Image (cartoon, rainbow, N blue to C red):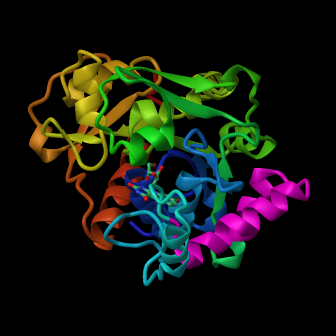
Amino acid sequence: MNGARFTGKIAALCGGVGGAKLALGLSHLLEPDQLSIIVNTGDDFEHFGLAISPDIDTVIYTLSGEVNPETGWGRKDETWRFMEALTRLGGETWFNLGDTDLATHAFRTGRLAGGAGLTDVTREIARAMGIKVAILPATDDPIRTVVETDEGALPFQRYFVGRQCQPAVRSLRYENARNTRPTPQVVAALEAPDLAAIVICPSNPFLSVEPILAIPGIRERIEARDVPVIAISPIIAGQSIKGPLGKMMGEFGMASDVASIADHYRGLVDILVVDEADREAVFDGTKKRVTKTLMKTLDDRIALADFVLRTAIDAKGDTK
Ligand code: FO1
């Protein structure tokens, strides 16, 4: 399909690496004003006094073609003089900051210190990198994912990067969530009269999607819309492609399969798109659509986005 035939708007909820791949695919098929990407900010943290927003930067770098293709985060062709000098100083080196990535963090920190909101700063960075699609932090208020593990409570990056997701997860908290509000831009995207579908990208439901849904008013606005809510499973044949999802689901006592994903999203999601490897999966209450969901190439990202848009067109009207 080319974007011209798809006439409505899409609001996509997105976390880091996996979600950004589908967001890139969608950005190739839709006009910029047709797509709003609502991004998780629960991974955000302060490091050396710098305001770091990893999922926002992963989406920006991915849509601008700047992302490091090996890691899915940070920038390609990166240099590491800062980290080398930091190591010589005996500074903390558990979180890698590339030289050009550092400019993004320094720019954002300066603008926030000057009183700008995260949404405005994100728009400035995205525009400077040639992105016309709206990349929207889910909130401009601070929200922090805290991982309760068998080693105690860990701020998200300390768990994810510092400990490489080793500790067993007992539960997750989204600190300050009750005091946050969706931004006006996020409200407008979810309330757009010509919204055709809401897409939940294949990000970790607990680490990337839940911190967005925990912001008062977001889940309610999604449930209130009569448009199809389409999620793409981040689990394929019992495995998560990247990150700790499979391990975490086991620690939560869940089977790491698409039926558990359907259970988790029940009531919110109308359609769950699963990979061909899960064609035989059975779950009730949520419609199943099957396609290739593993995205290795740009063509894979575009093909999955095309499938999602076709699914939205076919689903018109038969929402929950
Ligand atoms: N992930 C890592 O596993 N190791 C890192 O050193 C690391 C540095 C980093 C720097 C900037 C940035 O935007 C992301 C970075 N990430 C790193 C990924 C980050 O932990 C994200 O939160 C994950 O991609 C999960 O969304």
Residue 285 visible in the shown view: yes
User: Going 28% across and 36% down the picture, which residue do you hit?
Assistant: 166
Q: Is residue 47 left or right of residue 204?
A: right
Instruction: Please identify the dominant SS of the magenta region.
Output: helix
Dividing the image into four quarters, tell me where ligand 1 lies: bottom left
Q: Position of residue 23 (x, y in %)?
A: 47, 58
- Above or below 296: residue 315: above
User: Going 42% across and 30% down the picture, which residue do you hit?
Assistant: 206
The front one of 149 and 117 is 149
Q: Examine the image and state in which quarter residue 124 appears.
A: bottom right
The front one of 39 and 69 is 69
The front one of 71 and 33 is 71
The magenta stretch spans which residues? Answer: 97-126
User: Going 31% across and 70% down the picture, which residue do you hit?
Assistant: 70
- Above or below 32: residue 237: above
Q: Examine the image and state in which quarter residue 252 appears.
A: top left
The front one of 195 and 250 is 250
User: Going 49% across and 38% down the picture, which residue do you hit?
Assistant: 156
Q: Is residue 281 left or right of residue 228?
A: left
Instruction: For the N terminus, give its image quadrant.
Output: bottom left
- Answer whether residue 236 is magenta in the image: no
Query: How many marks do you count on the picture?
Result: 0
- Above or below 119: residue 227: above
Q: Position of residue 24 (x, y in %)?
A: 45, 64
Q: Position of residue 132 (x, y in %)?
A: 66, 70
Q: Is residue 6 left or right of residue 288?
A: right
Residue 229 visible in the shown view: no
Q: In this view, which residue lies farthest toward the right?
A: 115
